[in-house]
Image (cartoon, rainbow, N blue to C red):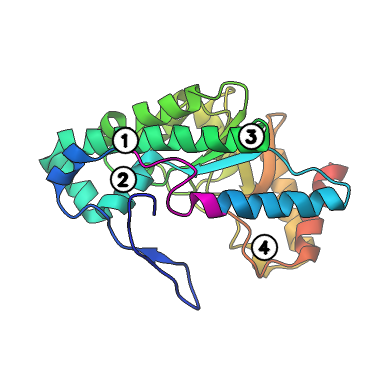
């Protein structure tokens, strides 16, 4: 939205944003928009401040939790994903430039959140393009920019969010990102398999299939799946949760079953 894309809002479903960059040569004249003052960023800060004040009135403090979409996500939305993907083959210079501009914007936006929140204890960068292109393109056009973002915030707990199915070559790159945690897709990657591939330096965040027992099953089925995830971890550090996200129709009883089982393990 900060680049000027038109946002279309739907009564049922997520909003859609039209590409803001219609031709690749426009990238040569592009500059990062003002972080925190353009697009939906000011509204995000305002919404967060309203929530902070409400919690403070109830005697609670809000977590200092920063979030941004990743640079390839932003470049893909601003340019249109199809054009962004084909430009990796046809116009690599333009892809590098727009991804670098998006990287500068992400860092500046996270800095704005850091200033507004009084610091960042945790930050999340959601980058789903990482696994959607050939590993060579990931290394050339995405990996160094994500590394630059995570390197800017060494004191925060840094979470890479991508619930997609990663090929072995993509999995091998994830530990080099500089992230501390990977919120992964438990519906596409069994916990035990992924633990064996990422090594000891990266904490996995997930373990339960968000479309399985926790959403559709009974509390006892959730307990059973939770126990399997704990056995799969086998002493490794894991943030037990649903991998991807928790759908709105997941019952509180099933979520409590997961938490209670983990606490009693």
Residue that badge 2 annotates: 75
What residue is shown with label 4? 213
Sequence-earlier tag: 2 or 3? 2
Residue plotted at (22% across, 55% down): 82
Residue 1 placement: quadrant: bottom left
The magenta span reads 32-43
Q: Mark 4 and mark 3: span between their CA atoms?
A: 29 Å
Which numbered tag is attached to residue 101? 1
Residue 122 — which label?
3
- Left or right: where 58 falls relative to 232: right
Precedes in sequence: disc 4 or disc 3: 3
Q: Earlier in the sequence, mark 1 or mark 2?
A: 2
Residue found 13% across the figure and 39% down from its top: 91
Q: Position of residue 191 (x, y in %)?
A: 59, 42
Dots 1, 2 in contact, CB < 8 A: yes
Marks 1/2: CA–CA distance:
9 Å
């Amino acid at each position: 939205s900060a680049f000027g894309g038109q946002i279309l809002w739907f009564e049922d479903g997520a909003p859609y944003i039209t590409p803001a960059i219609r031709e690749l040569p426009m990238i040569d004249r592009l500059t990062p928009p003002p972080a925190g003052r353009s697009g939906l960023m000011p509204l995000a800060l305002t919404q967060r401040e309203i929530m902070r004040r409400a919690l403070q009135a109830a005697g609670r403090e809000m977590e200092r939790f920063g979030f941004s979409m990743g640079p390839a996500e932003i470049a893909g939305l601003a340019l249109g994903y199809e054009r962004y993907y084909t430009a990796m083959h046809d116009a690599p210079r333009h892809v590098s430039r727009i991804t670098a501009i998006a990287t500068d914007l992400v860092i500046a936006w996270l800095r704005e959140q850091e200033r507004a929140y009084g610091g960042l204890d945790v930050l999340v960068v959601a980058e789903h393009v990482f696994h959607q292109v050939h590993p060579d393109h990931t290394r050339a056009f995405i990996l160094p920019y994500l590394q630059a973002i995570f390197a800017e915030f060494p004191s925060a707990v840094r979470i890479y969010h991508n619930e997609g199915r990663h090929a072995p070559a993509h999995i091998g790159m994830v530990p080099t990102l500089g992230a501390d945690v990977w919120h992964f897709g438990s519906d596409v990657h069994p916990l035990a398999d992924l633990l064996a591939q990422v090594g000891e330096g990266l904490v996995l965040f997930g373990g339960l299939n968000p479309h399985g027992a926790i959403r559709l099953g009974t509390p006892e089925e959730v307990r059973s799946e939770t126990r399997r995830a704990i056995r799969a971890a086998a002493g490794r550090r894991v943030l037990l949760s649903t991998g991807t996200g928790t759908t709105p129709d997941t019952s509180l009883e099933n979520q409590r079953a997961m938490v209670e089982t983990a606490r009693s393990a």
